[in-house]
C-alpha cells in the first residue's frame, strides 16, 4: 500500500503564491491577480482559490481592501511556516525518527474524552497507540493516538512496530481523506500511576496534556493525538501576528 502524499490543491496554490511574493514577482503593495485570473492560470475552482487566499490573508501575506481587491503585504514578520505548532508536529512525527519506545498498539476502548472528540459513543472500540519519547537520554513525553477502528484496523497503526511516517499519512491513506485542520485542547493535571513511573515524576507533579484533533474540511474528526508533558520540563510557545 502506497502512503505517498500529494498536498491538496489549495495548499499547492498557497505555496506558489508565497514563492512569488518571496521572490518579488508580486512585490509588496502590488495588486494580487484576481480570483478569475488565478482560477484560469491554475485550473482550479473558485472555492479552492478563495480558500487559499483566505489562508494567505489570515497569515498576513496579503490584505483585502473592500471594493479594491487584494494587495500584497510581503512575508509576515512571523511566518506561519516557522511557528512550531504542537498538533501539526504530533501528526507528522515519525516514530522511527524519534528516540521512542512503543508501549502498546492495537484495539482499545475509547476513553470518554477521546470518544467525544471523535464523535463516537464512549467505550467504542478504536485503534490506539502509546509511545514514550526520550530526549537527551531521559523520558520526555508520552504520546497516545486514537483512530476509528475502521480506519486503523489492518494498517501499520495497529501493528507493534515503529511508524515510518507520521500518523497523518496513514490516516489519509486508509480513510481516503485529506486532513484539513487541527483543533488543540490543552489541560493540566496530575499523572496517573503509569505516567508517574514512565516519566519519573512525583504523584503531585503537574502535567500538560495537549490533545490534537485532526479533521477534514467538513469538520469530521479522524484522529486524536495526545502528548503528555511534565510541566517542569516543557514550555509551550506560540507566536502570531496582531491585526
Image (cartoon, rainbow, N blue to C red):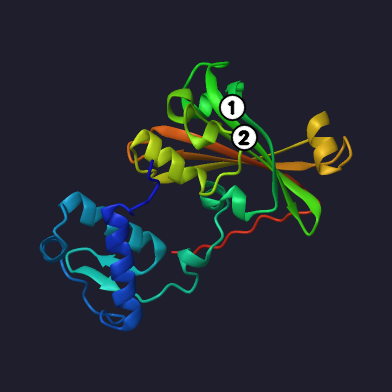
> Residue 229: image x %, image y %?
72, 46
Q: In this view, does 30 lie above or below 228?
A: below
> Residue 79: image x %, image y %?
47, 69
Residue at 21% x, 75% y is: 31
For residue 102, side relative to residue 4 (left or right): right
Residue at 18% x, 69% y is: 68
For residue 103, side relative to residue 50 (left or right): right
Q: Kindly identify which numbered label has been placed on residue 160.
A: 2
Q: Is residue 22 above or below residue 239?
A: below
Q: In which quarter of the image is residue 221?
A: top left
Q: Do the residues labelled 1 and 2 touch (CB within 8 Å)?
A: yes
For residue 43, side relative to residue 125 (left or right): left
Cα–Cα gap, marks 1 and 2: 8 Å
Question: What residue is shown with label 1?
Answer: 106
> Residue 202: image x %, image y %?
89, 39
Q: Earlier in the sequence, mark 1 or mark 2?
A: 1
Amino acid at each position: 500500500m502506497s502512503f505517498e502524499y500529494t498536498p491538496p490543491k489549495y495548499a499547492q496554490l498557497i505555496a506558489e503564491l508565497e514563492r512569488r511574493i518571496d521572490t518579488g514577482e508580486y512585490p509588496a503593495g502590488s495588486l494580487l491577480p484576481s480570483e478569475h485570473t488565478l482560477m484560469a492560470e491554475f485550473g482550479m475552482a473558485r472555492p479552492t482559490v478563495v480558500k487559499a487566499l483566505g489562508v494567505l490573508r489570515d497569515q498576513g501575506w496579503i490584505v483585502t481592501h473592500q471594493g479594491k481587491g487584494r494587495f500584497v503585504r510581503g512575508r509576515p514578520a512571523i511566518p506561519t511556516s516557522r511557528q512550531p505548532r504542537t498538533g501539526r508536529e504530533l501528526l507528522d512525527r515519525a516514530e522511527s525518527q524519534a528516540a521512542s519506545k512503543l508501549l502498546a498498539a492495537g484495539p482499545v476502548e475509547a476513553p470518554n474524552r477521546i470518544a467525544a472528540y471523535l464523535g463516537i459513543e464512549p467505550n467504542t472500540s478504536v485503534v490506539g497507540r502509546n509511545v514514550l519519547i526520550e530526549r537527551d537520554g531521559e523520558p520526555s513525553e508520552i504520546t497516545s493516538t486514537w483512530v476509528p477502528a475502521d480506519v486503523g484496523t489492518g494498517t501499520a497503526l495497529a501493528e507493534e512496530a515503529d511508524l515510518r511516517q507520521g500518523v497523518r499519512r496513514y490516516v489519509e491513506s486508509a480513510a481516503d481523506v485529506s486532513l484539513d485542520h487541527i483543533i488543540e485542547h490543552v489541560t493540566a493535571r496530575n499523572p496517573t500511576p503509569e505516567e508517574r513511573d514512565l516519566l519519573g515524576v512525583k504523584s503531585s507533579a503537574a502535567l500538560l496534556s495537549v490533545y490534537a484533533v485532526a479533521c477534514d474540511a467538513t469538520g469530521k474528526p479522524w484522529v486524536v493525538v495526545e502528548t503528555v508533558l511534565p510541566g517542569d520540563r516543557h514550555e509551550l510557545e506560540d507566536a502570531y501576528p496582531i491585526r
